[in-house]
Image (cartoon, rainbow, N blue to C red):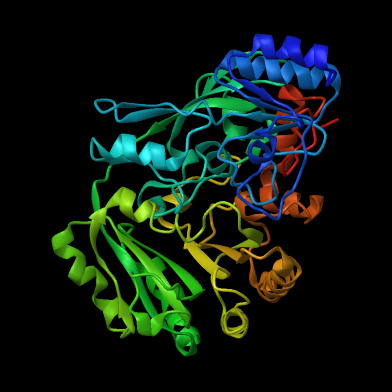
Amino acid sequence: MTDSTAVSEFSEKMTGEVIRPEDTSYDEARSVHNAMIDRRPALIARCASVADVQAALEVGRQSGLSVAVRGGGHNGPGFGTVDGGIVIDLSPMRAVEVDPQRRTATVQGGATWGAVDAATHKYGLATPSGIISSTGVGGLTLGGGHGYLSRRYGLAIDNLLEAEVVLADGTTVRTSENEHPDLFWALRGGGGNFGIVTSFTFRLHLVRNVVCGPTAWPISAMGDVLTWYRDFLPAQDDDLYGFFAAMTVPPVDTFPEAFHLHKACAVVWCYLGDPASADEAFAPVRAMQPAFDGIGEAPYPGLQSAFDALYPKGLQWYWRGDFFRTIPDAAVDAHVRFSEELPTMHSTMHLYPVDGAVNRVAPGDTAWAYRDATFSQVIVGVDPDPAKAAELKRWTVAYSDATHPYSAGGAYVNFMMGDEGQERVKATYGQNYDRLRQVKAAYDPENLFRINHNIPPAL
């Protein structure tokens, strides 16, 4: 199918652009957010419509080419690209339509969360997503989607009302609690295993300004602060969210120059309650005497995009994740040890709270299985220099190996690399794995959508 005549015929069917290895735009088009990923697809189909997606998928089916689907391109293992296959790139499909009366947003599969935030904030509305606004809506949502709003409003999938999906056979369906409910169940946490989602409809919530920002302590305080945090945050009202970080303070204006490039532990806060009550909510935080207090009121999209510039496209990334029900003292000790060895300025460890509203959904109600987890941990080795890739991986794996014995067993699928094995995928879906295999067999029996954390169809 990659001969010139066949590609020309395919290109004529497309309203979007078809990019081949000989085209001048190929190297830019094949790149993804993680520069550790360097793959050379045979074709890149930049789809501008559902019909384009169907045409590109037909190429993959008929030619036997592997099919990768790309939304925002942020996926850590690089599942948005594939050597020698076809990339179905949804990035031209990025429209966001907000219905402020119904409090819903319908979002095309190639949109980023920054576009969603911009469109919904006009009406004082938002829906749960992540912490970097350049992240694609599709990948984050299909993996579950946790972030600043999750303790109050749940995961992104808990706010998904319906989706439009191109299936492996090329047909298009709408799915919701009432239409193809088995597919809708699987999409909510099952990743890209079941089809290409060309649009999502989300429930929105009243969120305009938030009281937010970091508090930071010297790395020498890591043990005390983490022990306090693990006990403090789960006991707080759902309006208070804060993720814990081990970090090297970046040389940016947010932090005083005296802190620049020093190792620190920090909590990045988001308070959704009445701003007049914020001082009371943060009083126990300030009682911990942070060396830096950057808490203040800001528009929600400002918080969402605060880390975009620090983590642009083109850095080397290697990461590992785990869910935790608590952080026992032995795990705290491991965090102290490895945080003192952060290998580069961009490398970090985050603990994201996934309690509150997330825990009030039953484990079998969606594909996301760990509804009893309290924290979602990610350890990331990051740096611009490709020569440091091996060092980043060594530190990340060693850190993860030190804390994993205290984990709940599985991980947030969006925090997994592609080299962790099938048993890791099974552990991540837990009691839902067998049902997911049944749904896979119904909607993708030939496993066309396998460039992902794959769930093989049941036999």
Of 29 and 174, the residue lying toward us: 29
Percent x, y of residue 350: 52, 66
Of 60 and 432, the residue lying toward us: 60
In which quadrant will I find the C terminus?
top right
174 relative to 35, above or below: above
Residue under the image location 39 percent in, 52 percent down: 305
Q: Quadrant of residue 85?
A: top right
Percent x, y of residue 12: 67, 9
Of 427 and 56, the residue lying toward us: 56
Outermost left residue: 276
253 relative to 287, above or below: above
Percent x, y of residue 119: 32, 34
Outermost front residue: 24
Of 369 and 17, the residue lying toward us: 17
Q: Is residue 362 left or right of residue 193?
A: left
Q: Quadrant of residue 415?
A: bottom right
Q: Is residue 23 left or right of residue 132?
A: right
